[in-house]
Image (cartoon, grey):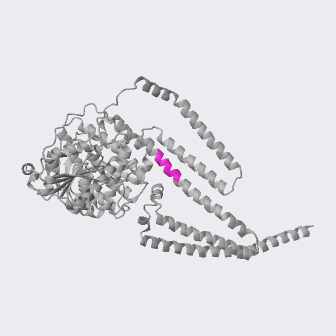
Amino acid sequence: MWQQVEQSLHDSMWRVFSKVAQLLPGILAFLVALLIFLLIAWGAAVIVRRVLVAVDFDNRTKSTTNALTELAPQQTPTLLVTRVVFWAFVAIGIMVGVSAFEAASAEYGISAYVFAYLPHVIGAAVLLFFGTVIGRFLSRSVLITAVNLNLQYARLLATGVRWLIYVLTAAMVLDHLSIGGDIVPLAFGILFGGIVLALALAVGLGSRDLVSRSLEREAVRPGEPPVEEKIHHF
Amino acid sequence: MKEEQIRDSGQTTAAETPGATVLLGITGTVDSAMLQQRVQELGAAFDARIIVAAPGLSETNESSIQFRSYALPASSPENLPWIITSMAQRAICSLAVELQADVCVLLHSDLLMLRADLVQWFAQPVLEKRCDLVLPVYASGKFEGLLNSGILSPLSRALYGHRIQYPLPLDFSCSAEMCAKLGAPHPSHDLYADEMLWPATVAAVAGKQVYQFHVDVSHARQTEGIELRTALASLVGSAYIEMEKYAAFWQRNRGSRPTPVFGAPAKQAAEGDGVDVKPLIDSFLLGARNLQEIWGPVLPPVTLFELKKLSRVPPEEFRMPDELWVRIIYDFALAHRLRTISRSHLLGALTPLYLGWVASYVQEATASSPFAAEQRLEQLARSYEENKPYLLSRWRWPDRFNP
C-alpha cells in the first residue's frame, strides 16, 4: 500500500514538474517580449517627447487643450501624448508576450481571451484617470466656491462631492472590467440613492427653519433698499 | 516736472495746433443724438479736425467734425464689462491708425469725460509735449478702488517702473505711435480674444512718455451682479498674464520713477465711520480653515505659518503686514505661471486673502485722513518694490528658492 502511495505522489510530482517545465519557456518568452517592448516604449517616449518639445506642441495646442490644463494643470499635452505612446507599446508588448507564451507552452485560448479583455482594461484605465481628475477638480471647485460664499460646511461639501465621484468611477470601472456581475450596479444604486436621500432629508429637515425665516423676512420687507456698501473693490 | 509748469502748459488750448486730427472714440454704445449735441458744444473749443467714433453712429461729414461708426467686436455674453471695454479700445486704436489721427482720445460710454476741459487735458500733452499716453487719476475715496490700490497699481509700479495710479483706465489718450502698438492684432488673436488692454504696461515696455492728470469724475461702478471672486480672478488673472508676457522686461527693470501728474486732486468726502470689518475677517478665517490644501502648494512654509498666526489674533488686532501681502501676490503670480494648480482655482483661492488685506487696511485707515490713507498705500507700493528681489528669485529658481 505504501508503495502505491509513494508511486502516486511520485507521479503527481512528476506531472507538476513537467507542467512547470512546459510553462517555463512560455513565461520566459513572455518576460523577454515584455522587457524588449518596455525598452522600445521608453525609447519611443523619449523620442516623442523631444520632438513635441522641439515643435512647441504645448503652445500650439493651447487653444484646444485649455480644458485639460484646467482639469489637471500638471498634465501638459506633451506629457499626455508621451504617456499614451509609452503605454501603447507596453500593451503591444503584453499582447506579443501572451502570444509567445501560448506558442511556447502549447496552452491554447489564452491569447484570444487576453486580446478580448485588453480593450476593457484600457477603457477602465481611462475611466479611472478621468474619474480621479474630475473628482479632484470638482471637489476643489466646490470647496473654493463654498468658502467664497461663506458657507461654514465648505469642506464637508467638497469631501462629499469628491467621494460621490470616486464611488461612481469605481462602479463604472468594475462594471467595465465585468467584475462582480450585477452586484456592483445594485450596490452602487443602493449606496448612491441612499446618500442622495440622506442629503435630501438632512437639507429638508435641517434647513426648514432657515428657509421659513428667509421667506418671512422677504415677505415682511419687500421693498427695503439694499444697504449702501462703504467699501468698494473696483 | 513741477506741477506749476504743468499747470501753465495746461492753460494753452488745442487751438494752438491747427490741422491736427483728433479721434474721439467712445468705448460703448451711446445715444447718437446726445453724443452729437455734446460734441457740437465741444467742437467750438477746438481748432483741430475732430473725428468722433462710436458703435452704430450714422456717418456724417460736417465742416470740422466727422462722425464714424466702428464695429464693436463680438463678445460672449459672459464677458465682463472691462473685457468688452478693452475690446472696444483696441478697435478704436485700430481705427485711429487707419484714419491717421494724430491723437486718439478714448472715453467711456457714460460720456462723463466728454467735457472740453478734460478732452483738452487728454489731447494737449500728446500734441504739444510729444507725450505718448495720458491717463486719468479718478476721484476716489480711501475705501474705493481697493483692488486697484491693493494689487493692480502697486504691482504694475514694481514691475514696469511707472508710478501709474490707474493702470487699467476706462479713459485715456495716446499718440499715433501708441495707437499702432495698442491696436495691433495679436499674433494669435483668437487665443487672447478676452485679453485686457493695459496701455500703461505697453507704454512702459516701449519706453514711452506717460502723463497723468487728476479728474473730478468718478464712473459708476460696472460690477452690479458680478461676484468679487469673478472680478478679482479676471483682473488679477489678466495682470498675471501680462506679467508672464513681459517677464524679460520687468526682470531687468529696477525701481520706479514718478510719472508727471497734472492738476489738483478732487476733494474727497469724509468717510470711514462705521465700516464693519467683521465679515471680511470672517471670510479670511473661513479660508484659512478650509483652503490649506489649495494654499499649501502655492505659498511657501513661512507664509503659511504667518497666515496661521494671523488667523489666531483677535479681530481688533488683525493686521496683515505689507511684506506678507506682497509676497502672497508674488507667490500666486508664480503659481499662475507654473500652473501649480488650476488657474481658476488659484485665483478663486486668492479672494479670502484679499478680503483679509482689505480688513487690515480698513482698520488702519478708518481713523486716518484721506492724505494719511494715501501715504499708507504709498508705503504698500514701496513694499512691492522692496520685495521684488524675492519675486525675481522665486521666478527664476522656483524649486531652489522656497523659503
Residue A168: image location, x then y, percent:
60, 49
Image label count:
0
Residue B52: image location, x then y, percent:
22, 51
* Drawn side of residue A135 relative to residue B92, left or right: right
As drawn, B154 above or below A4: above
Query: Is B137 in front, or is A169?
Result: B137
Residue A23: image location, x then y, percent:
74, 73
Query: Is B383 in front, or is B263?
Result: B263
Dividing the picture into quarters, in which one does residue A88 lie? Answer: bottom right
* Drawn side of residue A128 relative to residue B305, left or right: right
- The prevailing secondary structure element of the residues shown in magenta is helix
Query: Is B214 in front, or is A194?
Result: B214
* Drawn side of residue B279 relative to residue A188, left or right: left
Q: Give the magenta range.
A: A134-142
Residue B284 can be seen, yes or no: yes
Residue B197: image location, x then y, percent:
29, 55
- Please, which residue is most extreme toward the right here? A1
Quick one: quadrant of the N terminus of chain B? bottom left
Residue B259 can be seen, yes or no: no
Q: Which residue is found at the position 44% from the left and 44% from the top?
A: A145
The magenta stretch spans residue A103: no
Quick one: quadrant of the C terminus of chain B? bottom left
